[in-house]
Image (tube, rainbow, N blue to C red):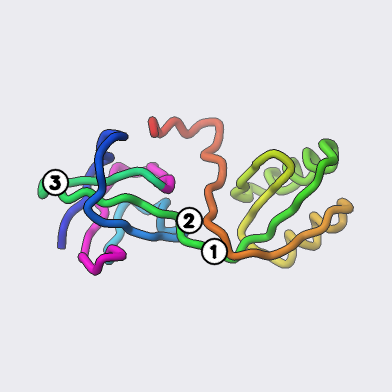
Amino acid sequence: MLKLTELAPPETLADDVLTLPFEARQKSRLPACTDGGVKVGLFLQRGQYLRSGVVLTGTEKFNVMIKAAPESLSVVHTDDALLFARACYHLGNRHIALQIMPGELRFLSDHVLDHLVEGLGLTVTHEDLPFEPEAGAYHGHGH
């Protein structure tokens, strides 16, 4: 098993890709298999959240790019800034990981949360997409 222990510099080319869902990209210790079939182990500093596109490396200098796996997401579209802000507020108040983009909000599918957002007057659709939520105000990860 190849050990991946640190973030490589941004310009580093990858030898392989490791596709992971959001939950796995939050783990500092994780056995995994790359898309190319190489067994790797993540041995990272605690508290890192791996964004899609970062490259990990280790003592063997085998470089692996992280890719966000498609996941079942609830997706909300609106041009109404007040409704959008209210949805973000109510979901954030429940400490829900949110991916916030202009006029679009994404979160891991949950029928209870869908009902909450619909109760605000918004429509929820469901799609399988990569999930890249906000890191949070207190998470300076340097990537």
Give the side of residue 65 with respect to residue 135, left or right.
left
**What crowding class fits label 2: few (fewer than 14 Cα within 10 Å), some (14-19), or many (20 or more)?**
many
Q: Residue at x 33, y 58 (%)?
A: 18
Asked if the magenta segment contains residue 32, the reply would be no
Residue under pointer 1: 71
The mark that comes first in sequence, 1 or 2, is 2
Query: Given contact means CB atoms under 8 Å apart, are the residues at marks 1 and 2 in contact?
Result: yes
Gap between marks 1 and 2, in whole Å? 8 Å
- Residue 75: percent from left, percent from top: 70, 56
**What crowding class fits label 3: few (fewer than 14 Cα within 10 Å), some (14-19), or many (20 or more)?**
few
Residue 121 can be seen, yes or no: yes
Quarter of the image with the N terminus in it = bottom left
Q: Residue at x 31, y 34 (%)?
A: 10
Residue 141: quadrant of the picture? top left
The mark that comes first in sequence, 2 or 3, is 2
Give the side of residue 71 with respect to residue 57, left or right.
right
Asked which secondary structure carries label 2, the reply is loop
Check the image and report above or below for 136 versus 53.
Answer: above
In the image, the segment drawn in magenta is: 34-52
Which amino acid type is shown beneath numbered disc 1? Glu
Check the image and report above or below for 102 versus 70.
Answer: above
- Residue 24: percent from left, percent from top: 41, 58
Q: Residue at x 26, y 56 (%)?
A: 16
- Residue 102: percent from left, percent from top: 69, 39
Q: Nearer the viewer, residue 103 or 114?
A: 103
Residue under pointer 2: 22
Residue 46: quadrant of the picture? top left
Query: Given contact means CB atoms under 8 Å apart, are the residues at marks 2 and 3 in contact?
Result: no
Q: Residue at x 16, y 58 (%)?
A: 2
The dominant secondary structure in magenta is loop
Residue under pointer 3: 61
Residue 32 can be seen, yes or no: no
